[in-house]
Image (cartoon, helix red, strand yellow):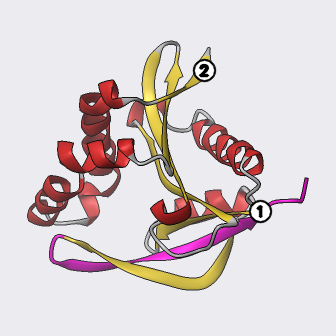
Amino acid sequence: MSMTLRRLTNKDLDTLRDISIETFSDTFGAQNTAENMRDYLAAAYTPEKLAAELANPASMFYFVLVDEKIAGYLKLNVDDAQSEKMGEDALEVERIYVRRSFQRQGLGRVFIGEAERLAKSLDKHQIWLGVWEHNPNAIAFYEKMGFTLTGEAHDFYMGTDQQTDVLMMKNLASK
């Protein structure tokens, strides 16, 4: 199995949108109403919104290709692109989206490794992320990767349903 990471460009917009909708629906569709999912997906993954995210120099998107097939993507944020004000010393892992047929193949570890590599290259000393409080498998995975719950959370709306992400942080060793 060959695996490579490729940074996205504007030419990847349509594929990014398709994979975002596919993976988000697969992951959270069963826990939310069809109406709330439809409303959320229609707002979160518009071509205009994704194009603006891709154009932001403080956000970085990467596809992971497994045997030359797009298996998922990673979105990282620094500075003002972070979804919470965590400071200039932090890098946010905003999205790890893996297609269902590629799950349980170690891609999450690859993405966290890339986040750590990039954080160190940018002289960041912390990596953080938000994860839905009702996603124990993801929380357990991030704990295995060295993240700890911060005790902080932020709310977001899935359509009309208010939901909570818990925040997790990993401190990186100094260079």
Q: Residue shown at 37%/42% (left/top)?
A: 54
The N terminus sits in image quarter:
top right
Residue 106: in sight, yes or no?
yes
Residue at position x 19%, y 42% in the image: 47
Q: Position of residue 85 (x, y in %)?
A: 53, 76
Can residue 136 be seen here?
no
Q: Nearer the viewer, residue 100 or 16?
A: 16
Residue type at the position of mark 2: Met
Magenta stretch: give its range: 159-175
Q: Is residue 115 left or right of residue 22?
A: right
- Local crowd size for mark 1, using a 10 Å CA cut-off: few (<14), some (14–19), many (≥20): some
Q: CA distance from mark 1 to mark 2?
A: 27 Å
- Left or right: 61 in relation to 129: left
Mark 2 lies on a secondary structure that is strand
Location of mark 2 (residue): 3
Instruction: Give the side of residue 38 with respect to residue 20, left or right.
Output: left
Viewer-proximal residue, 115 or 69? 115
Cβ atoms under marks 1 and 2 closer than 8 Å: no
Q: Tell me, yes or no, whether the highlighted magenta stretch contains residue 170.
A: yes
Give me the residue at 48% from left, 13% from top: 68
Which of the two residues, 65 or 32, is positioned nearer the viewer here?
A: 65
**Numbered circle sitting on residue 125:** 1
Q: Three-letter amino acid code at disc 1?
A: His
Q: Residue furthest right?
A: 175
Return the x and y of residue 94 as percentages of the image width and height. 48, 57
The residue under the point 77% across, 62% down is 125
The mark nearer the N terminus, 1 or 2, is 2
Magenta-span inclusion, residue 74: no
